Image (tube, rainbow, N blue to C red):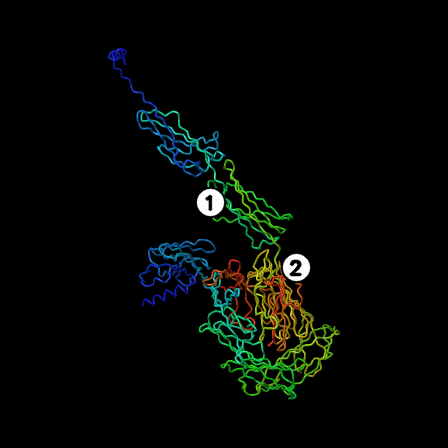
Amino acid sequence: MRKLVAIAMLSVAACSGDLSVGGDDNTTADGNTGMDAVPCGLQIGFDPIDPVASSVLPIRAYTNLVNTAGVLSFTWTVTFNGANVPTTEQAADGSQINFIAATAGSYFVTVQVSGPTDCSYASTAKYVEAPGANADVFRLRTVPAPNLAPPQETYIQVKGGANIDRAIALDSGISVTGLVKNTATSTGISAYLKFMPRSMPTAYTELFSSATGVYNLRLLPYDHDVLVIPTATTLAPKLVPWSAVPFTTELHVGPGTVVSGTVHNPAGNGFAGAKVQLYAGSVPSTIGTTAADGSFSVRTDFPTTSSQVTVKVTPPASSGLPRLEATSTFNLANALNINYAASLATCNLQNTPVQRVGANQANAQVTVVGALGGVAGTIGGINATNTVRVSATADGTGRLPSMLVPRGALNVVTVLSMTDHAVSAIDTSACSVTQIDAPAMTTITGATKDATMTALPNIRIEAEPVGVLATAGVAPIHIMSNDTTGAFSLPLAAGGRYNVRFTDPQQRAAPLTASNVAPGGVPTNAQLAKALALTGQVSIVNNSTPVIGASVQILCTTCSGLDLERPIAETATNTVSRYAIAVPDPGTM
Amino acid sequence: MSRFALIGLVLSGCFYTDPINQRPSLDIVRLPPVADPYRGDMVSLKANANDPEGYNVWFKWRAYACTDESDCDHAPYFEKSDERIDLMVPMDRDPTSTGAVRAIHVFLEGVDDYGATARPIQQLWIGVADHAPTLELRAGSGYGNVVNTPINVYAKVGDQDDKPETPQLSWIVYTPTNNPAYEFVDITVPDDGDTKHKQYGKRITPHGTGKFTIEVTADDLLGSPTSTVTQTIELNVGDDRAPCLRQLTPLVATAPAALPMAEPTLFQVHVVEDDLDPYPTINDTILGTTQFTWSLLAPGGSRQVLTGVTGNSVALDPASYQPGDILELRVEIADRVPRQIMCADSNATCSVISDNSCLQRQTWRVEVR
């Protein structure tokens, strides 16, 4: 029983972020004999645990003291926005107080303990939520200098209506040194390594091992999956488990299993230059390139638990054929036959003029993109999806060079400059394209405003191409709204679609995103919602080194793709290890 | 008494007269410490009385606050009848007086039980010493002491024996030898409730680099002579430093290594360290933010500046390229000071200050998968 008590008290000391711990109290504390080696612990607790702002109902703060003897006295302070909040004593010994939190926000509570104890001080910030506060959940990612601690992510719940003070205590992790080894030769190899914590894979750490296979980094002492992509193409990429206990010292990769096959063109002939790559989840194979007869081979070392494999085929750009992709439970022991549909035909757009308002556009970069209707090919007998992406640059007279494209209803993206692009439809079915139109950009004008519809100047506006523009590789357009009026003029391709993001670099307001919109869908009264200030101290547990210049990012929880990595808001810790970041206010009911 | 009675007395050889009550004598004894006290200090005095008849002597103390011997308050600030007194040196003279308390004049009178008054009245002149003011200086800048940005200088003044408002402050700015211009204005320092000290502030905005020295003098005019304390603080004003790339994702690979890119990837600069134009920035009238220039080198082409991209991130989609392609995505940063990145285009990194720990160019080498 005594042992159980000791364990329970130790766990309090270990888990509390508000804990002050002293180590030299050798008196027998609270009658628990035999616990002399256990340090004292002091923690502030609250009732209710999640208080709501009220001018009537008090919040009780109390001390949790462990392993402390003697008669103690307590001095409490409660502050809010720098001002003292009155308290009333709730226990004869002063160990409990009440206070009224009429306004939502973070209240700073400290208690000073006088008496025979080393645990003489504790402080904590208690968030008091607004009545009827809505809640939203975000990922909070903190990336300090690599020598301090590994990147870390946690989920945070943000309640609407009040600013929040939230300390970030980082786990310093452990310094890890290991070796990436080729199992076939037992030698170290150079490889790309991506250490992904199994509990939070997005908080990954990347590095390359040296030419001799050595790697060194800091990691959280939890289980990780490590994606190892050897530099040598004779070795297969592999997902390797890593654990702190027992400590993994070597990551093993090998030649893997050779998967071979043949790529046939619509005429049924093999052809050279097609790239073939297989994926099992995030684990790729090596890249195979077809020989003249269409044959290829790749090396795989997929997890045994992976049943679904994706095969991607990228023909040479000059072939005019679309890319193929299929996901299935392929039998990789058999040769993988990849066949373009016999019905596929191509068309050469050579000499086709690229025009804007009847004028040829010299040196225009043209990309034909889209997806063909019907089945463009099969992979291992499975119908594949297809993507067309063929590029060429018009000559000085604005006419295209030889440019084979599949026949079908497609789109053409024309880039006249980095900030001037156009989208138009093109039908190559009859191979009768007479010209490629590059309509002029359209300019969307508007203004950026805050939650009260007051002008909010200096807002960064990013128009990220999506759909065919993205497939063509068109770069995004970034502008800033006017520095006094918030007015903006955003040039966009008339037929294009964009994700348009309005973000405030000065963190005065929450971001606004218009997803997958045509130019007409861009909000002209771009009202950026109210933001809450999330502030706090960043520290390393059991390490007093300041955490300066650490990146603190707020990220989405239910998103995917690029948005997983795109911060909703981000900041960096200052010279006193504090951060302040604007998070969208979930509001109140 | 009748004449006959007197004659009778004389003849009998026996005189009787009423005894004459002699005056007591007085002394003021200063009890330790006997050094000149400061305003607010206690002075302990004791009356030594000697009455020839051994009668009790009753004392009356009075003390006056004075500036000098010719200028004392008309009314005593202290009166007491004890043999021993503890006398506080007042902070101020009578409200109608303008002089400072530089001495106290103590009077002691004594009367014995039978009304004999000590003569002369005892006096003690006690000079009052003066504590020099205390002065602490601190400078603070949110802008790294960069030229043309403000630096706040704070002076915390105290005076142990005066009100903290008493000392008068004077400020002198010594500029570097090239004598650059500067602005120097008062700023308000929030009251921290410290009644023992008062804080003053000035904001200097230097328009040149070098060592600026701020000399602050606090004069305690209540002292005699005026007690003064002078402190200086040096401000090393420097040029706007070059910005430094601090945190980027994903991993930057250097040749011959290449970062495998199997899915759309956001190349981001998360942290740029700079004195005036950091990224991310905050809402501030002086701070700006980093300028980003992105360029891309794809196979078969030349490096293309992504002129429309001015933010801290660029997304690349491997579907826009051929598997196996090697791309070079480059970011270059600048602050408000024009600084040409002179490194050769083939250099993956560049530091305009020849410091590899502070780069303004970084290049991701990416292999399309």
- Viewport quadrant of the C terminus of chain B: bottom right
Residue A536 seen anywhere in this rendered image of the structure: no
- Viewport quadrant of the N terminus of chain B: top left
Query: Seen in the image, is A105 located left or right of residue A290?
Result: left
Q: Position of residue B262 (x, y in %)?
A: 58, 76
* Vertical relation: A525 (above or below) A114: below
Q: Position of residue B107 (x, y in %)?
A: 40, 30
Residue B338 shows which numbered tag? 2
Q: Nearer the viewer, mark 2 or mark 1?
A: 2
Q: Position of residue B353 (x, y in %)?
A: 63, 60
Residue B356 lies in what quarter of the image? bottom right
- Residue at disc 1, secondary structure: loop
Chain under callout 1: B
Q: Which residue is mark 1?
A: B196
Please name the residue shown 37% across and 59% down the image. A24
Please name the residue shown 32% across and 66% down the image. A2
How far apart marks 2 and 1 lie (CA) works out to 49 Å
Residue A59 shows which numbered tag? none
Q: Are marks 2 and 1 in contact (CB under 8 Å)?
A: no
Q: In front: A343, or A455?
A: A343
Q: In front: A252, or A2?
A: A252
Q: Position of residue B291 (x, y in %)?
A: 62, 62
Residue B261 seen anywhere in this rendered image of the structure: yes
Q: Given the current orientation, which residue lies at the most extreme right position?
A: A397
Chain under callout 2: B
Query: Seen in the image, is A524 located left or right of residue A51?
Result: right
